Amino acid sequence: MSQDNMPNNALNDAQNAVQNDEFDAALEITPEMQAFYQRADAIIGLANSQLGPDAHSGQVGASLLYAAARYSASVASIGFVKGDDFAKEKDDIVEFYTKQYRQMLSDNLTDYAQNFDKYVQLNKEDKPAK
């Protein structure tokens, strides 16, 4: 996958900050990073709105993961003229997105573990009383 076809900017800025341990109170959140996190929060909000008697978190999570894969395939295709050329880059594209997802998942698992009591409490507050 050529560098021209790889999504970047705010995603890379956010990941570089986390990977370089620069993500602390002293780090200035750029407008691009803020927009990145706002979009992510909006998508998470939409996913949460799908929870209910007909769909539990595992089902919604599976749909969200599928949607991310489908959207990523569309984004990765930008800049290609022929499907054959796009198909030739499949392994590189999969490697790129897998690496990005692995890093983001790892970072979020670490954050969740470090803030577990706070996040678990927030989740309890979000659920309606029975």
Image (tube, rainbow, N blue to C red):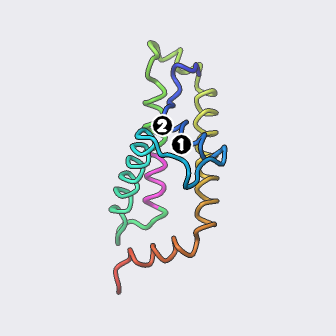
What amino acid type should be assigned to the residue bearing mark 2?
Answer: Ala
Question: Which element is circle 2 on?
Answer: helix
Residue 68, label in figure:
none
| Residue 129, horizontal then vertical, whole percent | 35, 85
Q: Which residue is mark 1?
A: 14
Question: Which element is circle 1 on?
Answer: helix
Q: Residue at x 35, y 70 (%)?
A: 52
Q: Which residues are magenta?
A: 59-66
| Residue 3, horizontal then vertical, whole percent | 57, 21
| Residue 120, horizontal then vertical, whole percent | 52, 74
Q: Quadrant of the C terminus?
A: bottom left
Categorize mark 1 by other alpha carbons within 10 Å: few (<14), some (14-19), many (20+).
many
Where is 125 relative to 47, above or below? below
Examine the structure image and report whether residue 37 is included in the region drawn in magenta. no
Residue extending furthest top? Answer: 81
Q: Residue at x 64, y 53 (%)?
A: 106
Q: CA distance from mark 2 to mark 1?
A: 6 Å
Examine the structure image and report whether residue 65 is included in the region drawn in magenta. yes
Residue extending furthest front? Answer: 26
Quarter location, residue 50: bottom left
Residue 10, label in figure:
2
What amino acid type should be assigned to the residue bearing mark 1?
Answer: Ala
Q: Residue at x 58, y 26 (%)?
A: 90
61 or 112: nearer the eye?
112
125 or 128: nearer the eye?
125
